Image (cartoon, helix red, strand yellow):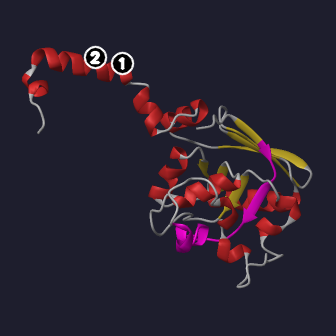
Amino acid sequence: MEKFKKIKSNAIPLPMVNIDTDMIIPKQFLKTIKRTGLGKSLFYELRYDENDKKISNFVLNQDQYKDSQILITGKNFGCGSSREHAPWSIADYGIKCIVASSYADIFYNNCFKNGILPIILPEDQVQQLLQAAEESLNFEVDLENQKISYILNNEAKSLKFDIDPAKKACLIEGIDDIGLTLNKVSHISDFENKQKSMNPWLYSRKLT
């Protein structure tokens, strides 16, 4: 998993509430078990019409938000089913940070497992960032210092955000659940060796 410390990018304003995982990545794209290739179908039913043509007024299809790594959106983001394809599609599109006032719990935790930083802020601050995203392309998310810097009405501003220290450390080091386990390999081996010496019969039985 790629390390996350600081990103500078424009921000995509998507002021919609209760965006569920089916809206993020519709069910017809869930056949794959690969994490790649889903970005082109992110928000598919909002981005494309019935003829698979881009809807020009949807924010992801507007030039000023091309290649953005930050998404600012409404409350209860990622609700609905627990499909991990939702954060897969967001990450594959290139979005590394989401800002909202609340998230569905499973989606929120899945973001960290896929290298995405989901920031929770009070609703009034989210609204301020949504306004800034429409006025300016200058945003910086600094995970180490837990700060968002931006420009609003030609004035430089910043906001602090909270994050669980363990989740923060995993993002900064680029470690997912498998990486966490691998970091404990020596301890696991020590336990197995100790257990084998104390209870050898657990290891002597042959499977038939």
Q: Position of residue 99 (x, y in %)?
A: 65, 54
Residue 29 lies in the magenta-colored region: yes
**Within-10-Å neighbours for mark 1: few <14, some 14–19, many 20+:** few
Please state if 6 lies on the left or on the right of 200 as rendered.
right
Residue at left offset 47%, top offset 69%? 80
Task: Say whether marks 2 and 1 touch (CB < 8 Å).
Answer: yes
Q: Is residue 151 above or below residue 38?
A: above
For this rendering, which residue is in front, 91 or 117? 91
| Magenta residues (range) | 8-30
Say which element carries label 1: helix
Quarter of the image where one finds residue 37:
bottom right
The three-letter amino acid code for the residue at tag 2 is Asp
The three-letter amino acid code for the residue at tag 1 is Ser
For this rendering, which residue is in front, 28 or 19? 28
Residue at left offset 47%, top offset 62%? 83
Q: Is residue 115 above or below residue 205?
A: below
Residue at left offset 28%, top offset 16%? 190
Please state if 80 lies on the left or on the right of 124 as rendered.
left
The quadrant of the image that shows the N terminus is top right
The quadrant of the image that shows the C terminus is top left
Q: Where does label 2 land, which residue? A: 190
Q: Where does label 1 land, which residue? A: 186
Say which element carries label 2: helix
Please state if 56 lies on the left or on the right of 182 as rendered.
right
